[in-house]
C-alpha cells in the first residue's frame, strides 16, 4: 500500500514578534529564520517520520526549489512526482508571537501551477487501495479527487486553508475528513464540537471525521463510534506544524492501529511539535514519540 501526498511545498520565513502586527504598525522582529514548509511538505515528513511509505507530488521553482526536494529526500520520501517550473516556489510569511501562536500569509507560486498532464502522469503509478492525502494549498483539487476516486484510492482531505472552493469539490467521495473546529464550523455552520460532528456525519455519512480542537484535544467519529482524546502538557514554543504533525501521524498510525491508538500517537507527536520552533524542524521521529512521557491532560 502506498501513500501519495499531492500537496504544497513552501519556503517559510518565520519572524519572532512580541505580538502580531496591527494595521498601520511597523514592528521589529526579534529574529527571522528560514524553514522548509507548506502543509503538504509538513504532512509528508510527519507521515515518513511516523514510519509510512510516502510519495510526494507537487511543484517547485527551478531556482529556489532544490532545498524543498532535498528535504523530502532526506526524510526518505519519494520525490519523482515533483515537477520543476521556471517560476518561484510557494512561500509563507509567518509571525510567531510570545505565546507561540502564529499567523500566516501564503504566496502560492508553483503550488498553483499543477496541470492535468502532471496529474495524469502521477496517477499512472497508483492503484486501488492506495491512500491519497490532500490539502487546500494547490490548484486542481477537483480533478485530482475525481481521478483518485476513479482509481479506487482512499481519499483524505485536510481542507486548510478553508476557502469557498472547498464547497465545489466532490466531498461526497471522501473517506476521511480531518479538520479543526474553525474549518468545520465554516463547512457545516455549527460551533459546538458535538453539533459539528452531528452535522458533518449527516452531510457526509460515508466519511470518517477527525476533528482537532486545539487545547481541547481531538475527536474521531465514523458515524457509529465517537472517540475523544485530550492533549499532553508541554511548554508551547510554536504551533506552526502542530496540525500537520497530527495529520501525518494519525494516518501513518491508522494503517496498522485502532483509531484510539492513532489518536494517542498523533496527539503525542503534535505535542512534541508544539514544544519546538519551526515547521519541518519541529516534527518528531517515531521512536521519540513512542518513548515520550509528557503529562496527559484529559479532554474532559
Image (spheres, rainbow, N blue to C red):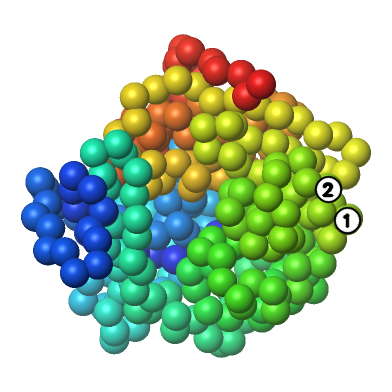
Local packing at callout 2 (Cα closer than 10 Å; few below 14, some 14-19, many 20+) is: some
Q: Is residue 19 left or right of residue 267?
A: left
Which of the image's four quarters has the C terminus?
A: top right
Reply above or below: 235 against 202.
Answer: above
The residue under the point 19% across, 53% down is 15
Let me know if residue 140 appears in the view.
yes
Q: Is residue 55 left or right of residue 98?
A: right
- The label on residue 39 is none
- The label on residue 202 is 1
Residue 193 position within the rendered picture, expressed as x and y whole percent measured from the top left: 70, 42
| Nearer-the-camera pick, 152 or 101 | 101
| Nearer-the-camera pick, 38 or 74 | 38
The residue under the point 66% across, 55% down is 184
**Within the image, what quadrant is residue 88 found in?**
bottom left
Residue 175 position within the rendered picture, expressed as x and y whole percent measured from the top left: 77, 56
> Does dot 1 land on a helix, a strand or a loop?
helix
Q: CA distance from mark 1 to mark 2?
A: 6 Å
> Does dot 2 land on a helix, a strand or a loop?
helix
Residue 25 position within the rendered picture, expressed as x and y whole percent measured from the top left: 16, 64
Most extreme residue toward the front is: 24
Q: How many marks?
A: 2
| Nearer-the-camera pick, 76 or 48 | 48
Q: Report if the CB atoms under discs 1 and 2 are less than 8 Å apart.
A: yes
- The label on residue 198 is 2
**Within the image, what quadrant is residue 97 found in?**
top left
Residue 107 position within the rendered picture, expressed as x and y whole percent measured from the top left: 34, 74
The residue under the point 82% across, 54% down is 199
**Within the image, what quadrant is residue 38 found in?**
bottom left
Let me know if residue 156 appears in the view.
no
The residue under the point 83% across, 48% down is 198
Reply above or below: 43 against 174.
Answer: above
Amino acid at each position: 500500500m502506498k501513500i501519495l501526498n499531492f500537496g504544497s511545498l513552501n519556503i517559510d520565513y518565520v519572524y519572532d514578534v512580541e505580538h502580531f502586527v496591527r494595521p498601520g504598525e511597523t514592528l521589529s522582529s526579534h529574529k527571522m529564520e528560514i524553514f522548509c514548509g507548506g502543509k503538504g511538505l509538513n504532512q509528508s515528513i510527519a507521515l515518513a517520520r511516523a514510519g509510512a511509505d510516502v510519495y510526494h507530488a507537487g511543484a517547485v521553482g527551478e531556482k529556489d526549489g532544490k532545498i524543498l526536494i532535498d528535504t523530502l529526500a532526506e526524510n526518505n520520501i519519494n520525490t519523482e512526482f515533483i515537477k520543476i517550473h521556471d517560476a518561484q516556489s510557494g512561500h509563507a510569511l509567518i509571525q510567531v508571537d510570545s505565546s507561540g501562536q502564529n499567523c500566516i500569509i501564503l504566496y502560492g507560486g508553483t503550488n498553483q501551477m499543477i496541470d492535468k498532464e502532471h496529474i495524469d502522469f502521477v496517477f499512472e503509478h497508483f492503484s486501488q487501495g492506495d491512500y491519497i492525502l490532500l490539502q487546500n494549498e494547490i490548484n486542481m483539487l477537483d480533478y485530482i479527487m475525481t481521478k483518485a476516486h476513479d482509481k479506487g484510492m482512499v481519499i483524505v482531505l485536510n481542507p486548510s486553508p478553508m476557502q469557498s472552493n472547498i464547497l465545489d469539490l466532490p466531498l461526497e467521495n471522501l473517506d476521511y475528513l480531518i479538520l479543526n473546529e474553525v474549518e468545520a464550523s465554516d463547512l457545516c455552520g455549527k460551533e459546538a464540537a458535538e453539533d459539528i460532528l452531528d452535522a458533518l456525519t449527516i452531510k457526509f455519512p460515508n466519511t470518517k471525521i477527525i476533528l482537532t480542537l486545539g487545547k481541547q484535544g481531538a475527536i474521531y467519529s465514523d458515524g457509529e463510534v465517537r472517540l475523544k482524546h485530550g492533549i499532553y502538557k508541554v511548554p508551547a514554543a510554536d504551533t506552526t506544524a502542530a496540525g500537520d504533525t497530527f495529520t501525518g501521524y494519525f494516518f501513518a498510525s491508522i494503517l496498522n492501529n485502532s483509531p484510539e491508538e492513532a489518536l494517542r500517537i498523533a496527539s503525542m507527536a503534535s505535542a512534541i511539535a508544539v514544544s519546538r520552533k519551526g515547521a519541518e524542524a519541529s516534527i518528531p521521529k517515531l521512536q521519540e514519540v513512542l518513548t515520550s512521557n509528557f503529562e496527559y491532560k484529559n479532554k474532559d
